[in-house]
Image: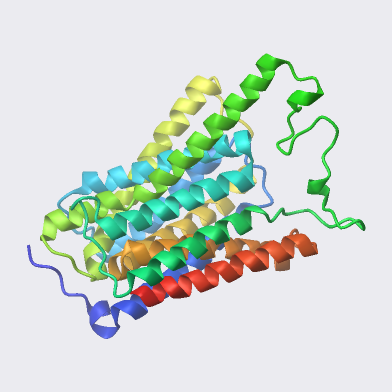
Amino acid sequence: LKLPESPVAAMTSDYALGFGTIAVAVVCFGSNFIPAKKFETGDGVFFQWVMCLGIWMVSVVVGACYNFQHVAYPGAAMLGGMLWCLGNVMCPIVINKIGMALGLALWGCTNMLMGTFAGLTGLGGLVDQDHLKTPALNYTGLVLTVGSMVGYMMVRPGEQETPGGETPGDVQLPGLTESGTESPRDGLLPSSARSAASDRLVGFAMALAAGLLFGLNFEPVFWAIKKEYGESSSSPDVVLPYVFWHFTGILVTSTVYLVVATLVFNRGKVSNVDGAMIVPTLVCGVGWGVAQTCWFVANNSLGQSVSFPIVTALNPGVGALWGIFYFKEVKGMRNLGFFGLAMGLAAVGSVLVALSK
């Protein structure tokens, strides 16, 4: 099958298109939850479905731009969407078991490393392998961007320093760990201690699994493109027709999860639904959908070994900037220091990764 000609690619270089779409993806990923921040999301089940509906709305627009062009392997693209959605539904469980900061760091690093590994190796020929001019720069940049994720993990929103130089998060209540559970040394029964340790182990495992699923969600699409065309192309017209099917996979999986969770766990009731949150949550989904669409284009233009470290390292920084300047929830020299360190590592690492191409 002949590769389609792209008027976009003819007008601009792959680098400009790739890094331009990376910039949009970073901003949108870092900002997409802002519209729903002030609303209660309950157990998150209905929230994630409404958000996935907003995501799918973006794919309808993208699909319409291509007249819902026939693709050879729509099922593969839907599989990629399913992988992402399965990872997404794990995240609230992870946060409940090990906390948001550690959970974000674990699945963020795993996502970054898995996506980069797929680009560097081609997964044994399943997808096209990236070709870098200076691999050493890429590896060095990758190490720095992983370090930035650890720095972000140390930023604790809502905390301020006390006159003694500690943050409230550094001062624990007697008998409580950072996760808010009673510590074993303060009277917790051995069986309960084992249960708490087991919960944390499950949380760690699910965070790693979620990161792997996030890191692999593009691969079925790029496998399909390789099978369909028999050669690689940086044209966005190759990858964008698959976005509709990828996002449809997300919505279908999310809908199945909503039905199962409602019938099995909530006994037929959708719990804690605030009608006022629906439109803002749809906006969250639209923002995420725009970001993911741009990331598809960036992956296709630059390769996953370039786009993954940059997108995953910089978008938490955008979210933190909202917390510092708009919500005023990131305060104190400790928090600002770790944020500055994380952003510095992410920026230097991203530059090195970009130069490796």
Relative to 237, say whether 250 is above or below: above
In the image, is residue 267 above or below residue 330? above
For this orientation, the residue located farthest to the front is 136
Q: Which picture quadrant has residue 227?
A: bottom left
For the point 53% across and 72% down, which residue is it?
A: 347
Question: To which quarter of the image does residue 97 belong?
Answer: top right
| For residue 175, above or below residue 7 | above
Q: Nearer the viewer, residue 349 or 308?
A: 349
Picture coordinates of residue 83, whole percent (x, y) = 36, 42
- Please say whether residue 49 is visible from this viewpoint: yes
* Count of residue discs: 0
Quadrant of the snapshot with the C terminus: bottom left
Q: Quadrant of residue 2?
A: bottom left
Whether residue 316 sits left or right of residue 213 in the image: it is right
Q: Quadrant of the N terminus?
A: bottom left
**Closest to the observer, 226 or 141:** 141
Q: Classify residue 271 as left or right of residue 29.
A: right
Q: Is residue 191 left or right of residue 333?
A: left
> Outermost residue toward the right?
163
Task: Inspect this view and state whether residue 21 appears.
Answer: no
Residues 147 and 220: in front is: 147
At x 62% / y 57%, what residue is drawn? 152
At which x and y percent is residue 72? 14, 52
